[in-house]
Amino acid sequence: MSRIAFVGLGNMGGPMAANLLKAGHSLRVFDLSAAAVQAAVAAGAVAADSAAAAVADAEVVISMLPASRHVEGLYLGENGLLRAIAPGALVIDCSTIAPASAQKVAQAAAAAGIDMIDAPVSGGTAGAAAGTLTFIVGGEAAALERARPALQAMGKNIFHVGASGAGQVAKLCNNMALGVIMAVTGEALALGVAHGLDAKVLSQMMAVSTSRSWATEVCNPWPGVLDNAPASRGYSGGFGNDLMLKDLGLAAEAAMGVGASIPLGELARNLYAMNSRAGHGGLDFSSVIKLVAKDA
Ligand code: NAD
């Protein structure tokens, strides 16, 4: 069992930390939100006064923050954690960030004698709570082996997709496809309901037909179709619209970097930007259906 520091206890980090505790690891935690820290303490973690205090004697440091700027801000610079983490420790960043940002932080970590992998996740808040996340790992194979016991406590599938930053590239590919699928699933349900169909029956049919997807079966965007989906609790507590918007922006940057064409990914990015401007940036990304369905 490892001494683990966990920074970033939000919708994903909170339940991930709880699963590490259940597996018997000891956890020192930090988050800017006192409520998030309290929830982790209730699950058995020890609260630290700062991120630096959390990592002081940690063997493994895990971060789960919103975006590139938060991860770079946490680890780099005068007061960055790379100065507080003991050489020889392992850093696992599970945030979804720009591949170049992941490489930049991993290089600085290596210069400080610290192994670092990018390990963004897929599976949503339900997967984080159930401990069934998919980890998409970029970095050295030996570092992944050191990370494996912690990752196995939080997830079911672990993919090593390449060197530092590769985990982020693969994650962006997944989320670009997800963003498009969610938007078009919302359109399909809105079309059916406008013709008088029952959204639940339509969804049940689609879930066993050729358009079946996570958007239909797990995170259905129509309120009331699935009790546990964010749509059925006012689109709260899932994967924020603005986090999807961030990921589609990162996908667009990644596409420009290699001259790839992503026409649907770009279209989806605009849809989530419109949903954000409509005041839904903090809601689950399935609220994109609101652009086409006034009853959702
Ligand atoms: P969130 O906004 O719910 O949580 C982020 C947490 O980080 C917050 O509690 C915030 O207070 C904390 N934080 C921010 N800056 C900090 C700092 N400097 N020090 C300490 N704490 C800090 O976000 P989330 O939904 O948990 O997502 C986290 C990451 O996981 C994002 O990169 C997101 O794209 C990715 N992700 C989310 C989901 C999902 O379904 N929510 C799924 C897969 C991946």
Image (cartoon, rainbow, N blue to C red):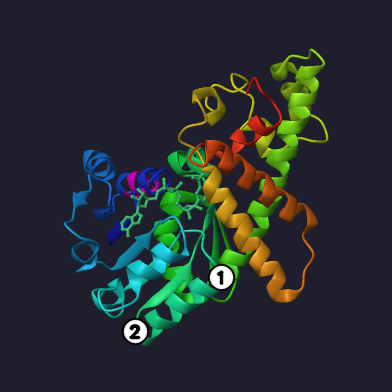
- Residue at 22% in and 43% down: 41
Residue 149 on the magenta span: no
Residue 99 - label = 1
Residue 66 position by quadrant: bottom left
Most foreground residue, 1 or 171: 171
Residue found at x 47% / y 32%: 236
Is residue 1 among the parts visible in the rendering? no
Relative to residue 198, is residue 148 depicted above or below? below
Q: Position of residue 183 (x, y in %)?
A: 70, 39
Q: Residues within 10 Å of mark 2 (few under 14, many from 20)?
A: some
In the figure, 191 relative to 15: above or below? above
Q: Which residue is mark 2?
A: 113
Question: In whole angstroms, how far apart are the C-alphas of marks 1 and 2?
Answer: 21 Å
Is the residue indicated by label 2 positioned so its CB lies within 8 Å of ligand 1? no
Which of disc 2 and disc 1 is earlier in sequence? 1
Q: Quadrant location of the N terminus?
A: bottom left
In the image, the segment drawn in magenta is 16-20
Q: Amino acid at mark 1?
A: Pro
